[in-house]
Amino acid sequence: MAGASPPLCLVVLVVCLLGFSGAAADMNGELEITWGGDRAKFLDGGNELTLSLDKGSGSGFWSRNQYLFAKIDMQIKLVPGNSAGTVTAYYLRSEGSKWDEIDFEFLGNLSSEPYIVHTNIFIQGKGDREQQFYLWFDPTADFHTYSFLWNPKNIILYVDGTPIREFKNMESKGIPFPQKQALRLQSSLWNGDSWATWGGRVKIDWSQAPFTAAYTNFNDDQACIWSPSASSSCAASSKDDSWLSQQLDSAAHQKLEWVHKNYMIYNYCTDFKRFPLGLAPECGTQG
């Protein structure tokens, strides 16, 4: 995947929908429940969606749209109480065996212990780019906004507008970057107790089931909607498309550094024991 970044008028045609709607809206037309039966539900006329996990199964949904670059927001309220062993996954992913993927995974914990935000980036089916964080608030007490910014310049993950991770496009230096496959937003709540909490040493307490996470205010208004039959490119828009070239400014970099200094608990770019043959080539250049 080495080489210069392609122009925005890509071979794969997309339609760029721009603008912003701040109010909660019916998500039924934008999101589709994909598994788990009645464990996944739209509530309040589609303004809220809940996923549940019990001993029988978890549940999940995905976006009806696929994207080739996007700025996506979703407000999530995570599983409260003793959530040890549960995983609430919220991610962008392509199809196929050589998939691209951009992850938030919220790893549950005992009632007195904090959630861990596990992030990863897969390119052509290869991950191993994990960074993990604690949060500076209780993510189960109220809804908080978790955002993806994915454009030809970089990937930035945000929590309530604060950047927690930056992955720059450095294909010109031979470092792969996901920009050739359409990604779909997906989320699921599932049993991850083989690894999620203390390396799998703490299992799910099924007496606490069902476990439930809630979602609202999905926003993909600033996104390039991919379609195999689209007739115009993402660049073909007279509206505000500044997000397509958005990067962190100095103030945002200071916020990123604050998160890394105070809340980062794992970084693949400093794990020499795990990677004795050398760290990934992007390490030292990424946030």
Image (spheres, helix red, strand yellow):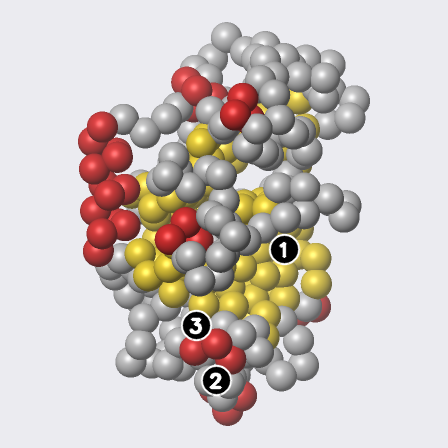
Q: Residues within 10 Å of mark 1 (few under 14, many from 20)?
A: many
Q: Residues within 10 Å of mark 3 (few under 14, many from 20)?
A: many
> Residue 139, image x and y in percent?
33, 63
Which residue is depicted at the point 48% across and 84% down? Answer: 201
Q: Is residue 110 left or right of residue 40?
A: left
Q: What residue type is labelled 2?
A: Arg
Q: Which of marks 3 and 2 is in front?
A: 2
Label 2: which residue? 201
User: Are discs 3 and 2 less than 8 Å apart at CB?
Assistant: no
Pick the quarter of the image with the N terminus. Answer: top right
Q: Is residue 233 visible?
A: yes
> Residue 107, image x and y in percent?
45, 68
Q: Is residue 54 left or right of residue 120?
A: right
Q: Nearer the viewer, mark 3 or mark 1?
A: 3
The image shows residue 98, relative to residue 44, as above or below, that is: above
Q: Can residue 214 be seen in this view?
A: no
Label 1: which residue? 61
Residue at the far front in the pictured view: 277
User: Are discs 3 and 1 less than 8 Å apart at CB?
Assistant: no
Q: Distance between the residues labelled 3 and 2?
A: 13 Å
Any mark on residue 108, and which? 3
> Residue 12, image x and y in percent?
72, 21
The image shows residue 234, relative to residue 42, as above or below, that is: above
Q: What residue type is labelled 3?
A: Gly
| Mark 2 element type | loop
Q: What residue type is labelled 1?
A: Phe
Which callout, 3 or 1, points at the residue further toward the start of the chain? Answer: 1
Q: Is residue 3 left or right of residue 80?
A: right
Which callout, 3 or 2, points at the residue further toward the start of the chain? Answer: 3
